[in-house]
Image (cartoon, grey):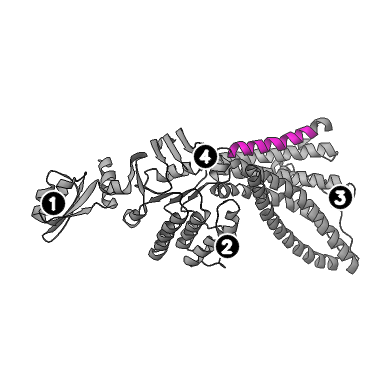
Amino acid sequence: MKNKAIYLKVTNDMFWVQLFWAFGVMGVMLIIQIGKLILGINQGNAPDNFYSTFFVVANFFTFIIGIISASFLPYFVGNGVTRKDYFRGATLASIGLAVILPIIALVISVLTQFILKQVASVTFKEPNFDAFSSDSNLIGDIIQFLILTPYVNPESNLMLALGIFSLNILMYYLAGWLIGVAFYRFHTVIGLGFILISVTILTLENVLIRNTLNLPIHDNFSFIDLPVTIAVPVIVLIVLLVLWTIRSLTKNVTIKM
Amino acid sequence: MNIKVENIGLSYGNHTALEDVTFELNEKKIYGLLGRNGAGKTTLLSILASFNQPSKGSVTIVGEDPFENASIMQQVAFLYDKSYKDETSHIINYLKDIQRYRPNFDMNYAEYLVGKFRLEKKKPIKHFSKGMQSALNVIIGLASRTPVTIFDEVYLGMDAPSRDIFYKELLKDQQDHPRIIILSTHLVSEMDYLFDEVILLNKGRILLQEEFHSLMSKGAAITGSAETVDDFVRSMNQINEKQLGSTKSVTIYGELHDDKKQAAVDKGLEVAPISLHDLFVHLTEEENE
């Protein structure tokens, strides 16, 4: 009973701190959006809606807070929390964030569109996350591919859109967390190795989700073509494998002083 | 509460930080852990706090392995020279966060100590001076009231009045809420009166563990006229001497029986207890030779 209470406290603490950071990012984005909108109206360009802009930013954001979440480990162990409770608490917090952030983004998006439509006749641009511009540069292609995670328009299928958004940012969070704990546990060289592993995992996950959703896949990765019945379990397996690796790396880790 | 350390060892690559360390702490009192730089004090304490695991031997706290043991880890607080350079919280909020994880935490006492150490409540912790950050560690350690509280060189950067507040509050709170307190320190002469028991660690090994008073009877400082003192201590193990004019003081190591003491007094010599500082320097020096 005591144990359960402790990891839920960790979840609560990490969830709110990170959500607070997310609000900070969203606030800045909203200010930029408003600025762009004012200019956009003047220039006659259709603005992006908040949801689709945050869709791209959220990947970077969750990746970074994932890296930072490794630094919560010494804080919690220093306060008498086990590594296991930290792991369970942080995992639940990451899932909580992955679920709540798309919903918040959607609500802000709908609200801003509603308000704007009252004051001016603005039409929002439909995002196109499927148009790849390959320049035969593999690294560039991978980066572009990583930025453009699988997107489903919430107007076509709301639950699926939010679910895919959540899955994307959860993967970015976990990839960041994996890198964070690898750098905490090992020296720089192995840490860099884990960056490579994380990028590979994110790319694979991206391809598999696109496979499942029948979204276009970049030529470089078209050789990975799994049927949905296999792709979905593999996606879940990858998430679990990353979590297992994070737990293994932190299970007995020495707390640095 | 009981801490049992049996034959633990810890090596990093070729470096042996701890070797065959065995001791037991059974009573709610203040233990002074002394040792020179690199003696392995922090390594030993970090193992008790589950920051680290020994590569050999075993540690048990109330009969259980503390590592990854939620109910034990909750009862052990380890305060050390920690950097708060990235901590943007204000002190009261920071203490409230810690309170969530320490069942015995006394927030009123913590706030009283914040006032006592004159820490600024409206300043982010990262802007605290070194001494103020150390005072924060002291506050966390005292107010958490964990059954095992470890202070590892926690006074670093604190000015003399702040250290004095620390010592006074430590003794007072220990009286009201007894627990196992381990103080690791270099400031032997300043802090010796705090210790009920002393553990001396040297080169990763336990040199001695003894009650403070019985340890103090292990030696004496003999003061008087230089000639008489020299004559008296000739056959004894002398570890330190000071001379001012014709007056000389020699510190001897080894128990001084009552008849010997009386003989010294009869010769007009003054017999004072040995200082822990002298003993510490002597014992760790001897090991080096």
- Residue A217 appears in which quarter of the rendering? top right
Number of numbered discs present?
4
Amino acid at pointer 4: Pro
Chain on which label 3 sits: A
Q: Which residue is mark 2?
A: B92
Structural distance between the alpha carbons of marks 3 and 4: 50 Å
Amino acid at pointer 1: Ala
Amino acid at pointer 2: Ile
Instruction: Tell me whether circle 4 and circle 2 mark residues in contact (CB < 8 Å).
Output: no
Instruction: Using the image as rendered, state which of residue B157 and residue B22 is in the foreground.
Output: B22
Which residues, given as a range, are shown in magenta? A232-253
Q: Position of residue A110 (x, y in %)?
A: 85, 58
Q: Residue at x 35, y 52 (%)?
A: B186
Q: Main secondary structure of the magenta part?
A: helix
Which of labels 1 and 3 is toward the front?
Answer: 1
Q: Position of residue A158 (x, y in %)?
A: 87, 48
In the image, is A98 to the left or to the right of B30? right
Q: Position of residue A63 (x, y in %)?
A: 68, 48
Structural distance between the alpha carbons of marks 1 and 3: 96 Å
Q: Is residue B16 above or below residue B148?
A: above
Residue B59 in sight here: yes
Instruction: Tell me whether circle 1 and circle 3 mark residues in contact (CB < 8 Å).
Output: no
- Residue A193 appears in which quarter of the rendering? top right
Q: Which residue is mark 1?
A: B264
Q: Which residue is mark 4?
A: B66
Circles 4 and 1 on the same subunit: yes
The answer to which of marks 4 and 1 sits earlier in the sequence is 4
